[in-house]
Amino acid sequence: MTKHRVWHLRGGIYPPENKAQSLQQPIRSMPLPAQLIVPLQQYIGSPAIPCVSIGQYVFKGQLIANSPQAISAPVHAPSSGIITQIGQHPVIHPSPLEQPCITIDLDGKDTWIAHQGSPDYAGQSQDDLLLRIRAAGIIGLGGAGFPTAAKLHTSGQKIKTLIINGAECEPYITTDDILMRERAADIVTGIQVIAHILQPEEIFIGIEDNKTAAITQMEQATLDTGIEVVVIPTQYPSGGERQLIKILTGKEVPADNLIAQSGVIVQNIGTAYSIFEAIVHGKPLISRVTTLSGQALGTPGNVEALIGTPIKHLLHHAGLDTQQVFRIIVGGPMMGFSLISTELPLSKTTNCLIAATRDEMPPPPPEQDCIRCGLCADVCPVTLLPQQLYFFSKSQELDKAEQHNIFDCIECGACAYVCPSHIPLVQYYRHTKGSIEIQNNKENKSGHARRRFENRNARLQQEENDKIAKRQARINTVTVIAPVTNQTLSAENNAMEIARLKTAAATSAKLAVDAKKALIQAERKQAQNLDSLREQVETLQKNAEQARQQLLKAQETETPSEAPAASHSANTATLAAPQTSADKIAAALARNEARKIQQERARAVTSNSTESTLAHPDLTAPNTAEKASSTTEKTQNTRHPSHKDS
Amino acid sequence: MTHILLAILVIMSLALLFGSLLDYVALRLKINDKGLVNKINALLPQTQCGQCGFAGCQPYADAIAHNEAAINRCPPGGKTTIYELADLLGTEPLPLNPEHGVEKDLPYVAYIREEECIGCTKCIQACPVDAILGAAKLMHTVIADECTGCDLCVEPCPVDCIDMIPVKPKNIDWIWDKPQGGGHVAFSRIPVSSIQ
Amino acid sequence: MSLINASSPHTLAKNDTGHMMQHVVLATLPGLLTLTLFFGWGSLINCMIAAIVALACECVVLFLRKRPVAFYLNDYSAVVTAILLGLSLPPLSPWWISCIGTAFAILVGKHLYGGLGNNIFNPAMLAYAFLLISFPVQMTSWLPAAGLTQVGFIETFQLIFNNHFDPASIARIDALSGATPLDSVRSELGLSKTLPLIYSTSPFDGIFAGKGWEWVNIGFLLGGLYLIFKGIIHWQIPLALLLTLATWAFLFMGYDSDRYASPIFHLLSGGTMLGAFFIATDPVTAATSAVGRWIYGAFIGLTIYIIRTFGGYPDAVAFAVLLMNLAVPTIDYYTQPRTYGHKEAKFGRGKRER
């Protein structure tokens, strides 16, 4: 078998691996805790919306929260029990802030909901498989947690290479290693499902050379499958997505692009296994293999833990020595963060928990001055200048930090690892990245506020101008037609009288129309008081007729020369009024119809829980409403040609 | 003796020459007014609150560009804006002038207590960014996403039903603290009781 | 008993600034030993005076700057500066030369710029240049390579501390002083003597490049190789410096071997090896990018050759290093590496256009 070429990754470090302590035993399961606290926000974006209520009994694997957004994953109950709380709870995060969670008090029976998989994945369409992966709530288990269905939905982009990430370069973590040792065949099936969806030209599994047992198992499982196991040198951080792509294909993904745009997709071993479980067995993602390691544990190892298990429970059952423990870390020692409480629930992306003693991880020494030795730049896998970034971060020169590509930093920690002055470089960069984003948000917000302010000023200015123009127009028409005489004075009085009658006629007409509308609605609903309504309508219509007659009489007694000119626009207005109001009624009724239809459709969409949000229901009814309202607008515009809606 | 006098003369004329050259250059390459005003305006927070004493951010930017106002009069912009303005203009940053207000550490938005609102539209007319939704004799409400916290709406309200409330920081707004620097350690201690 | 909450990474390598500096001091020992063997006890005593004064000045300044004194003294940077300066001074220079020089190096050369890591110029070389210009007589009174016994330890001590005021001491020092090989090459060439003639007289009689000095330089070369092996300095700067110096010397020698000295002579005399491995590689003042280091080292080599051959001073290492220290920000400006995923490197420090 010809070995695939492996490219060299620049920089990198070789920290002590500390993996042996968690590989002594096979994967074991944990006893059920009393309570599970399932986080609803797994990734950046809005949290999933609960679809259960407090007091409801849920089965293991039952859907408890869904999200209509495309980049999101639904959440399932990891065990059977009763929902006791839906609200905020602290979760695993470097900040002490809280996130929405659903708390389930377990009944201990662990009863599965009815579920069924289908081993024949090759016979299903790609869209169907993606829907089922989404429905199973699968996200990237390598640490970032990006929803897998969204990642595999490449929408037309041709994928040349599928890379499965089995590198696991960080010290202490052994979940992928032990999964590959024990469940190699299942993982390969999962990879084949992904391959069926993406149809890549080549498939690689990258595994570091320190995992000899795993390599053997995977090579056996991938015989005659077209999947190639590539052994890469042990180096940190060779397991980062972009770094692994460079090692296996020699290509560098451009910094501004999504990785998929270069024709490569990278998936984690754990994700491939979850896909296997979801497609072949029909089980949603409700548990994951997590490494429990560190000298302060009595029985370190890998456990199959339910999502939402309190960390306290896991550490306790691994024999945590609370006297010896000095630091509890979520994730690996290079990129993980330390915890200040163990009441937090396990999330889908928690791949490792380390309970370290003081000797194992002594407190970091105080920070000294940077001596500009350049060791940090020697080890940076992204070829950044960590030294310069440090100086810019310290002096708050955010522009310069951005220009030096601080956003390309993957926060691997290699630079801080080698720094002889013990400077916490990664914390500086994280702070600076956050500061730059805050600054950008502030600028966007102020730009937005400025535009609104300018629009408002423009609108007020426009209204001023309109008022002046109208005043001008009124003055012009009056002086042209009416010289100042006694006749004019009486004519003015008449004009005022006519104006009053006009208002009265318009008001009574409107009242009549409103009453007619109410009657029609009541008839439709078959309400009780139809007779009184009908009487009202008749009275109002009579009043309206009377008012109109009065107006016409008053207008006829006017001198013909004055009346038409002065009330020309009023006449057209009065004549036009019935038409436009009729149009308006028709438009309003049509809009109501359309809204009802839209609501019904929306209800149909959300009730079907596996419905992909990528489909757009087409609504024809609103279009007719739009057409009706546009004709109304047109006739309104002829009435007031100079008035523009803002 | 003549040598010394000659030397003095030469040095003086050189000084005169270079001095006038510098003056001329300073005059010719004077700051372009229009562009500068826009650049200053882009740095201001655009709350249009008037706390600086000018009728909005654009007039204040104008005044700064013409050296009629100091750069430390904007409380919503705070220290960051003062530093950015100092950077742009090449002047010294000054502390915020307390006559014009104090810098608030949290963002605030207005909130209308709807039970008390009488629908007079006075606040709608006062809002510089049209962040209040409503019409005459109908309910008024503040669109929180558009509100810049300028609190110009609070005064005109005849029934005093508008409150300024601080916005709670969301998870997405949290950032890491900056390490303290030389000689300090970058960790904190927590009591072990939190894990028992 | 408490837990700690710290930022990643949670394990650190065993690197430490203090240890690195200690290794640098250790690496100067072969050179220092050979200096003592050939030129007497003077250099050792000068180094000790310098070290004591450096630590004292550092204490005072840190106290005035309200910094934790013991913590900052632990990085040994003051000791390194002191020893490098002490090695550059003539063996019998008076005690006050060492004191003034070291005080200048620590106070002006280092702390005035902001402390360790913030200085532009190499403090030891800054002090050397300052002393050379202010006290030319004392700074150019070198000894011939007459071995350890020419002046006994007690006598050296007395000469150094008698401050050159005592007429007997002055007479003694005058009797002892001689020119360095570089000095004599320069002055004799000025008298239109050819090189082969110069090489045959004292202070040469050496195997390669002047008796005594060649072994001193070989001693520093060994120390430098030790530092490269330990990974404490980058190999690009010394290699670039020595290669450039040798190349230019070779070219000029090919042109006229009677008037231009050989590469071996340039490499093994004066402060070349000390400069190449200990002074030019000072991390605080050297260029930071990989390409930048090559450029920096090469131009120092070139400048050393130019000043030695055409300039006014016999030994040029200090001035060459200081000149290139000035150029380091520009070198860094133009030699940023290309980041992963970007098509080409960006220039400049970056100021966003608004």
Image (spheres, rainbow, N blue to C red):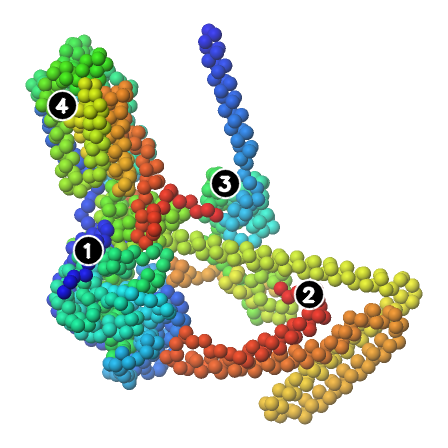
Counting from the top left corner in percent of width and height, residue C173 is at: 16, 13
Amino acid type indicated by mark 4: Ala
Label 1, label 4: how far apart the Cα atoms are: 47 Å
* Residue corresponding to mark 1: A235
On whether disc 2 and disc 4 are found on a single subunit, the reply is no
Have a look at marks 3 and 1 and say if they share a chain: no
Callout 1 crowding tier (Cα within 10 Å): few <14, some 14–19, many ≥20: many
The numbered mark 1 sits on a residue in which chain? A
Quadrant showing the N terminus of chain C: bottom left
> Residue B65 at x, y = what percent?
56, 42
Residue located 60% across and 92% down the image: A526
Q: Residue at x 41, y 62 (%)?
A: B170
Would residue A416 be seen by someone viewing this image from the given angle? no
- In this view of the protein, which residue sits in the foreground, A450 or A55? A450
Q: Residue furthest top?
A: B1
Residue under label 3, please give it. Answer: B89
Which callout, 2 or 1, points at the residue further toward the start of the chain?
A: 1
Whether residue A634 appears in this view of the structure is: yes
Q: Residues within 10 Å of mark 3 (few under 14, many from 20)?
A: some
Disc 1 vs disc 4: Cβ atoms closer than 8 Å?
no
> Could you tell me the amino acid type at mark 3?
Leu
Name the secondary structure under disc 4. Answer: loop
Q: Position of C166 compared to B119: left or right? A: left
Assign a secondary structure to mark 1: loop
Taking the view exactly as shown, the residue that stands out farthest to the left is C149
Q: From what the image shows, is residue A451 above or below residue A275?
A: above
Q: Which residue is mark 4?
A: C209
Q: Chain of mark 2?
A: A
